[in-house]
Image: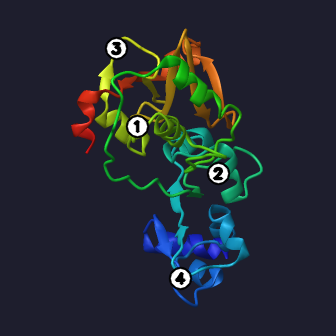
Amino acid sequence: MKAFALGVLLALGGALAGSYRVQPGDTLWRIAVSHDVDLTVLLLLNPEAAGGLKAGIELRLPERHRVAKGETLWRIARRYGTDVATLKRLNGLSSSALAVGQVLWVPPAPAAAPPAPAVAPAAVDPARLERIASAYLGAPYRWGATGPDAFDCSGYVGRVYGELGVALPRSTRDLWARLEPASDLRPGDLVFFSFGGRGVDHVGIYLGNDRFIHANSVKNRVMIERFSAPWYRKVYLGARRVTPAKRTGLR
C-alpha cells in the first residue's frame, strides 16, 4: 500500500497536510485509502487511534517531502519540527542514507495558534522560574506535545510560563515574531536558534549564569546546557523578552 500511496501522491502532485475529523462509521483503513496515506504511517502519527476511533476526534495527516541534493535526515527533521528517529519510523528506514528525489513521509507542520493574551508580571522571579522549569528535567521530547509528560520546545516554554501565570503564543515562530527583542540576557528571556539558516527552529529559556533549559530534540529530553557552548553560539539567532508592554500586542 505504501508504494501505491506514494505513486498516487506523485501522480496528483499534491501534498497531504493538516488533520481529519473522524466521521461516524469511519475506519482507519477507509481514512488511509481516501487520503492516500499509508495505514502504518497514519497509526504512527496517531497511536491513540489503535484502540479504536471515536467520531469527532482529529487525526493528524502527514505531508510528503522530496529529498533535494545535500539534504540530510537531520536537516529535514529540523525543517518539519520533528526528529530523525521519528522520520525513520515513518518511512521504515534502517539507516540515515537518502537519495535525491526520494519521497519521505513527514509529520504535518504545527497549526498556527490563534493569538493568546499575555498576562505577564512586571518581572520574572529567577528562583521561581528555575524551580518551575527544573521540575520537568528529564521529561521526554515529543513533537507537538505540551506536557506535562512530554514536550516539544515551544510546548515546554509555554508550559513553564503558563505556571508563571503567562499565556504565550504556541509556536516558536510566533514567539520570535511577537515578543520584545532582548539584547542583554536576563533570567526568563527566551533564546532562539536557527539550525538550517532559514529562520527560527528552536527555543529555550535562559536561566542565568551561562545556562539555559530546553526540550532537546536531539537528546530527546528536557535538560540544562551551557549557553556559551560552541554549537549553540554558532546557531544562536537572538533572544526575546516577555514584558508588560507586550500584553496588548499579544491579544
Q: Residues within 10 Å of mark 3 (few under 14, many from 20)?
A: few
Name the mark nearer the viewer: 4 or 3.
3
Q: Nearer the viewer, residue 188 or 41?
A: 188
Q: Give SS at disc 1.
A: loop
Q: CA distance from mark 1 to mark 3?
A: 21 Å
In this rendering, position of residue 247 left or right of residue 164: left
Q: In the rendered structure, which disc, 1 or 2, sits on the residue that comes first in sequence? A: 2
Percent x, y of residue 7: 56, 73
Seen in the picture, residue 66 relative to 24 is either above or below; the reply is above
Name the mark nearer the viewer: 1 or 2.
1
Instruction: Find disc 4 in the rendering and name its residue.
Output: 34
Instruction: Find disc 2 in the rendering and name its residue.
Output: 87
Q: In the rendered structure, which disc, 3 or 2, sits on the residue that comes first in sequence? A: 2
Q: Residues within 10 Å of mark 1 (few under 14, many from 20)?
A: some
Seen in the picture, residue 111 relative to 116 is either above or below; the reply is below
What amino acid type should be assigned to the residue bearing mark 4? Ser
Q: Give SS at disc 4.
A: helix
Instruction: Find disc 3 in the rendering and name its residue.
Output: 183
As drawn, the label of residue 166 is 1
